[in-house]
Image (cartoon, rainbow, N blue to C red):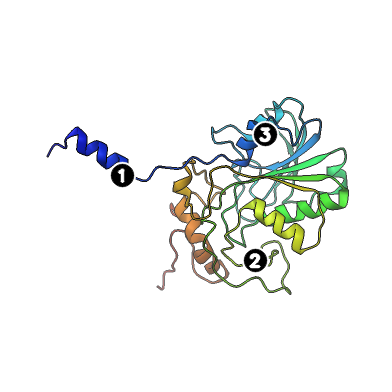
Amino acid sequence: MKLSPLLVSFFLAAQPACAKVLLGIDVLEKGGFKELKGKNVGLITNHTGMDSKGRSTIDVLHAAPGVKLVKLFSPEHGIRGRAEHGKAVEDGKDAKTGLPIFSLYGKTQRPTADMLKGLDALVFDIQDIGTRFYTYTTTLAYALEESARAGIEFVVLDRPNPLTGSIVEGVPLDPSIKHFTAYLQVPVRHGLTVGEIAKWHNGTAWIHARLTVVQMQGWSRPMSWEDTGLKFRPTSPNIRTVTAAVLYPGIGGFEATNLSVGRGTSEPFEVFGAPWI
């Protein structure tokens, strides 16, 4: 059956519009990088640190007028996101810019005083997936604490929570537990963006860091990832899809058991099981 042009127009108009979200890096650029002008900057990032046009935050800040990007820092999985779960990441050098890369998942998980020497500001731009035991937010918290000790500014370029900002599930972490995959006293599915986590940790842990969050434009709490109009990039070797990110708060809990969570398959964290099930 052929639909009339009028009916087609009505049908398309009735579809919900896909919102366009400007990321923190987009807003920073739109504002002329005023938060970083005249500063020596270090950047904590990885392959997910891109603007909405697909340009690396490293490249954007390296070319930004009045901003001097001098050091890079990488989390678990490395700055290119290729290192497997739990594998130590080595220091290195960025092939394109020639900048030194300091690992925050190797000999140390915190930026040291030597690493921070000469910096006026430390910037964080990594896509999180809204789950407490995903290590990027621990790296955020550690770096925030060390920036406060060093007396340098900490800047977070905010990004959406793929699990939405309107659903919170699970009990907060027991205060007696403190390690790299269980550091922040938030629920398993916390409903916060990285910028909100930074603000919360800075306030509740009495860190008193000089914190600036470059907020998104166009994002609202009920938004799913599909609503943002943004391309989802695998955040680590085994979180390859939005579906895996959404399932991770539940399926990830089975990693502490003798069940498989799909590592080594084509659908990690989208399946779980064992030969005897």
Q: Secondary structure at mark 1?
A: helix
274 relative to 13 in the view: left or right: right
- Quick one: quadrant of the N terminus? top left
Q: Please, what is the three-letter code of the amino acid marked with disc 1?
A: Ala
Q: Please, what is the three-letter code of the amino acid marked with disc 2?
A: Val
Residue at the image point whose x is 44% and y is 69% from the top? 274
Which mark is nearer the camera, 1 or 2?
Answer: 1
109 relative to 46 in the view: left or right: right
Residue position for label 3: 58
Q: Please, what is the three-letter code of the amino acid marked with disc 3?
A: Ile
- In primary-sequence order, the first of circles 2 and 3 is 3
Q: Quadrant of residue 52?
A: top right
Q: Secondary structure at mark 2?
A: loop
Q: Position of residue 80 (x, y in %)?
A: 62, 40
22 relative to 99 in the view: left or right: left
- Distance from the alpha carbon under mark 2 to that under mark 3: 30 Å
- Distance from the alpha carbon under mark 1 to that under mark 2: 39 Å
Asked if labels 2 and 1 touch by Cβ distance under 8 angstroms, the answer is no
- In primary-sequence order, the first of circles 1 and 3 is 1
Residue at the image point whose x is 55% and y is 65% from the top? 168
For the view shown, which residue lies furthest in the left direction?
A: 1
Q: Secondary structure at mark 3?
A: helix
Residue position for label 1: 14
Residue position for label 2: 186
Residue 268 in view, yes or no? no
Tell me if mark 2 has few (under 14), some (14-19) or many (20+) residues whose alpha carbon lies within 10 angstroms of its own. Answer: many
